Image: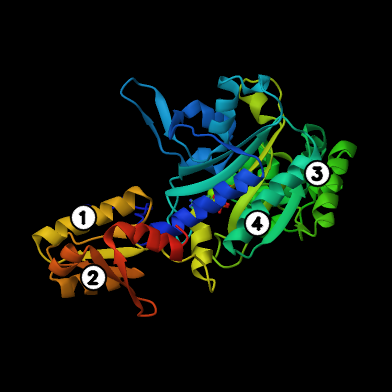
C-alpha cells in the first residue's frame, strides 16, 4: 500500500465541511475588510525565497522543498505566502494602482520540518497583505482582521505585539544585543553563533533551551526605538486600546522571517504545545525593495489553518452542522425509480441538496440509508404515487407527513426551509 507522504494529510469527505467553514469565514472577513483574493503558483524560483524570506531564517536554511526542474532551474515549493504576493505585486505593476492594494490568499505551504501536532510538511495558511500604506492605522486594521477571523471561529488566543524598529534603531539595538550575548556565545547553539554575526535579532527567536536561558534577560528592543518607530508603535497601541482589543507587549517577538520592520504580532495559545502560534504577522517595509521593486511599505499576517482546526475541535460548539441532503426520494421499481431520478434532478437544478438510490437497495434499506445520511425529508415513489401524481413527504425530525404533488415538491420545501 502506498501511503500519504510523511507530514502531509488527507481531508476526508466527512471532514471537509470543517475546512470549508474556516475558508468561508476567512473569505467573509476578507470581504468586510475590503481585501481581494490573489493566487500565486505553488512553485517559485528559489531565489525569491532566499531574498524574500532571508538566508538567516530556519525556513530558508533547513525547511525548503527545493529541487531542479527538468530545465535545470532551481525551484521551491512555497514555504509561505508573502514572498509570492510581493513578487506578484512587483511583476504586475500594482504599484501604479490606487493605494493601498489590499489582498488576501488561502494557500498550501511546504516546509521540511519534524511533523508533530500542528506542525506539518504541507500545511495551509490564510493570509492578508496590504501594500502601500505606512500609516499605523493599517497595522491596527491588519491586527483587527486577524482578531476578527479568530473570534468568528471561536478560537481563544492572546495577542502579543512588539515593534522591531527600522534600520536605524535596529543598528543600535543589534550592538546592544551583541554586547549582551558576547560572553555567553560559547554556551549557545551553532545557529545562534552564526546569527550573532549575520542577524543577532534572530537569536531571540531561538527555540533551543541552551539559548533560551540567555535570551530571556536580553535587552528589549522597545527601549531602543527611534522617535518615529516609537510614535508608530504608540499609535497602534492606542487604536487597539480604543477598540478594546486586549494585547500584551512582548519584546521577545521578532518573528521567524527576515523582512519584518516596526510592528510584529502573534496570536498565541497554550493548547498545542510548542505549536502555540496560530497567527503571526507584521510590517515588512523593506521587502518590496529587497525584491527589486520601488520602495513600498507593506504589512500582513498568516494564520495556520491546521492549528486553528485543532483548537476548534477542542471547543464546545466548534463547527456549524455538517451540510446534509435536505431530501431523499426513494423509488420502488424501475418506472418509479426513473420518476425519483426526475424529481431529484429537478430539485438539484433549482439548488436543493437532494439524494436518491445508487445501490439498487430495497425501499426499506433506502430509508435506513436516508436516515444515516441525516436527511430531513423522505419521500417514496411507487405505482400508487405514479398514478396519483402525489407523494407522501415525511419529516424525519418530527415524524409529520404531508401529501404533495410531484411537481410541487420544490414549492413545498421552499415554503418550509431556507434554500
Ligand atoms: P513556528 O514558530 O511555530 O515554527 P513560524 O514562525 O515558522 O511558526 P510563520 O512562518 O509565521 O510560522 O507562519 C504563520 C503561521 O503558519 C504560524 O503561526 C502557524 O500557525 C502556521 N505554520 C507555520 N509552520 C507550520 C507548519 N509546519 N505546520 C502547520 N502550521 C504551520
Ligand atoms: Mg517555523
- The mark that comes first in sequence, 2 or 1, is 1
- The mark that comes first in sequence, 4 or 3, is 3
Expressed as whole percent of the image width and height from the top left, the position of residue 182 reads: 73, 46
- Per the image, the residue denoted by label 2 is 369
State the residue at coordinates (56%, 32%).
85
Residue 334 is drawn in which quadrant? bottom left
- Per the image, the residue denoted by label 3 is 176
CB of residue at label 4: within 8 Å of ligand 1? yes
- The mark that comes first in sequence, 1 or 4, is 4
- The mark that comes first in sequence, 2 or 4, is 4
Closer mark to the observer between disc 4 and disc 3: 4
Expressed as whole percent of the image width and height from the top left, the position of residue 253 reads: 70, 51
Closer mark to the observer between disc 1 and disc 4: 1
In screen coordinates, is 242 left or right of 261? Answer: right
Compared with 151, 5 (above or below) is above
- Per the image, the residue denoted by label 4 is 267
The answer to whether residue 63 is seen in the rendering is yes
Q: Residues within 10 Å of mark 3 (few under 14, many from 20)?
A: some
- Per the image, the residue denoted by label 1 is 341
CB of residue at label 2: within 8 Å of ligand 1? no
Q: Determine whether label 1 and label 4 are within 8 Å by CB.
A: no
Amino acid at each position: 500500500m502506498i501511503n500519504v507522504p510523511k507530514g502531509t494529510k488527507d481531508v476526508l469527505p466527512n471532514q471537509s465541511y470543517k475546512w470549508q467553514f474556516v475558508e468561508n469565514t476567512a473569505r467573509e472577513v476578507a470581504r468586510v475588510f475590503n481585501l481581494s483574493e490573489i493566487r500565486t503558483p505553488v512553485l517559485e524560483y528559489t531565489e525569491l525565497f532566499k531574498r524574500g524570506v532571508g538566508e538567516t531564517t530556519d525556513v530558508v536554511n533547513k525547511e525548503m522543498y527545493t529541487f531542479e526542474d527538468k530545465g535545470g532551474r532551481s525551484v521551491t515549493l512555497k514555504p509561505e505566502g508573502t514572498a509570492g504576493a510581493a513578487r506578484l505585486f512587483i511583476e504586475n505593476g500594482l504599484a501604479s494602482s490606487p493605494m493601498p492594494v489590499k489582498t488576501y490568499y488561502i494557500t498550501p505551504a511546504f516546509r521540511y520540518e519534524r511533523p508533530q501536532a500542528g506542525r506539518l510538511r504541507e500545511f495551509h495558511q490564510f493570509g492578508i497583505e496590504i501594500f502601500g500604506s505606512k500609516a499605523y492605522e493599517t497595522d491596527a486594521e491588519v491586527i483587527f482582521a486577524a482578531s476578527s477571523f479568530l473570534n468568528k471561529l471561536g478560537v481563544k488566543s492572546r495577542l502579543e505585539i512588539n515593534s522591531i524598529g527600522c534600520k536605524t534603531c535596529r543598528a543600535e539595538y543589534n550592538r546592544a544585543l551583541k554586547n549582551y550575548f558576547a560572553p555567553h556565545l560559547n554556551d549557545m547553539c551553532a545557529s545562534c553563533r552564526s546569527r550573532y554575526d549575520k542577524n543577532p535579532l534572530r537569536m531571540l527567536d531561538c527555540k533551543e533551551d541552551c539559548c533560551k536561558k540567555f535570551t530571556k534577560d536580553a535587552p528589549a528592543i522597545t527601549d531602543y526605538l527611534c522617535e518615529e518607530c516609537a510614535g508608530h508603535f504608540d499609535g497602534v497601541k492606542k487604536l487597539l486600546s480604543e477598540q478594546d482589543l486586549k494585547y500584551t507587549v512582548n519584546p521577545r517577538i521578532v518573528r521567524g522571517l527576515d523582512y519584518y520592520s516596526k510592528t510584529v504580532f502573534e496570536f498565541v495559545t497554550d493548547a498545542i504545545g510548542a505549536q502555540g502560534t496560530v497567527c503571526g504577522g507584521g510590517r515588512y517595509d523593506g521587502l518590496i525593495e529587497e525584491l527589486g521593486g520601488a520602495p513600498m511599505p507593506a504589512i500582513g499576517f498568516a494564520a495556520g489553518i491546521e492549528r486553528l482546526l485543532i483548537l476548534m475541535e477542542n471547543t464546545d460548539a466548534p463547527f456549524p452542522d455538517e451540510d446534509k441532503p435536505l431530501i431523499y426520494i426513494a423509488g420502488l421499481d424501475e418506472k418509479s425509480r426513473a420518476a425519483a431520478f426526475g424529481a431529484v434532478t429537478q430539485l438539484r437544478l433549482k439548488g436543493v441538496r437532494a439524494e436518491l438510490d445508487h445501490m439498487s437497495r430495497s425501499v426499506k434499506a433506502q430509508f435506513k440509508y436516508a436516515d444515516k445520511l441525516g436527511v430531513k425529508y423522505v419521500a417514496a415513489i411507487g405505482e400508487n404515487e405514479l398514478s396519483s401524481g402525489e407523494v407522501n413527504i415525511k419529516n424525519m425530525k418530527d415524524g409529520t407527513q404531508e401529501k404533495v404533488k410531484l411537481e410541487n415538491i420544490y414549492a413545498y420545501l421552499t415554503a418550509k426551509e431556507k434554500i
